[in-house]
Image (cartoon, rainbow, N blue to C red):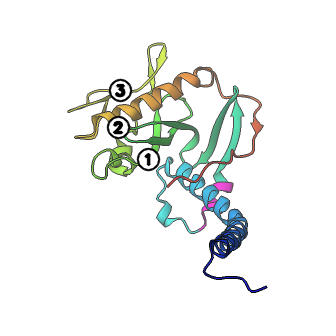
Amino acid sequence: MKLNTNSNVYTIIYATVIVVIVALLLAVVSSALKPRQQANVELDRKKQVLSSLNIDIKQVKDVDALYAEIISEQEIEGQQVFVAKTEDGTKYIIPMTGAGLWGAIWGYIALNEDKNTVYGTFFNHDSETPGLGGEIATRGFQTRFNGKHIKNADKYEMEIVKGEATGEQVQAISGATITSKGVETMINTTLAEYTKFLSGAPAETTEQVEPVEEEVQQ
């Protein structure tokens, strides 16, 4: 029996076969690329952690080797902490997540061994406006935190202000008040969660933990 190529049945069968073939091909490609995607996510995470230590990643030839040499991922007082052994001494790096004006923001804050002085920061975003909120991802903004202190009386917090900053304040990004305040909220919310760790002496025992698998963030 000859199939009528002009019939609706033929059209439906043909379309179904094409859809199934394309779906199978996409599944195969996705499965093949997944290990590479995960490796790229992990490499990007390591770059971000190292960047919080004021390291120029563009000058690093082997990110994996440097990370393995100076960074250990630990759980201290029930919180994830990256401990870095640098030429400037031990640094504690805390991961952060929050919300900007248009979407997710995230970053890392590196503290000196006193758990009070900011050694460096790294921030990034999903969809903040270039030239405005997107400036949180630039070193020009991130270095404004260097040397500031997070302890204020019995609280751990930082203040980002419009205009000229004084004392322990950090100057906000001009024209991006909401995103700047989003960074402030992200930092202070995270510090509140790490109060036990920040208020204690360096832990005598620590537990090495495996890195948490993250979604791809650009």
Q: Amino acid at mark 2?
A: Thr
Q: Is residue 218 above or below residue 205?
A: below
Range drawn in magenta: 62-68
Q: Is residue 209 magenta?
A: no
Q: Is residue 117 above or below residue 20?
A: above
Mark 1 residue element: strand
The answer to whether mark 2 and mark 1 are in CB contact below 8 A is yes
- Seen from the viewer's position, the closer of residues 10 and 72 is 10
Find disc 2 in the rendering and name its residue: 179
Find disc 3 in the rendering and name its residue: 159
Residue 49 is situated, as x and y percent measured from the top left of the image, at 56, 49
Q: Quadrant of the N terminus?
A: bottom right
Residue 163 is situated, as x and y percent measured from the top left of the image, at 20, 33
Measured Cα–Cα span from mark 2 to mark 3: 13 Å
Residue 125, disc: 1
Q: Earlier in the sequence, mark 2 or mark 3?
A: 3
Residue 42, disc: none
Residue 206 is situated, as x and y percent measured from the top left of the image, at 75, 34
Residue 193 is situated, as x and y percent measured from the top left of the image, at 58, 24
Q: Residue at x 46, y 41 (%)?
A: 104
Q: Is residue 170 above or below residue 192?
A: below
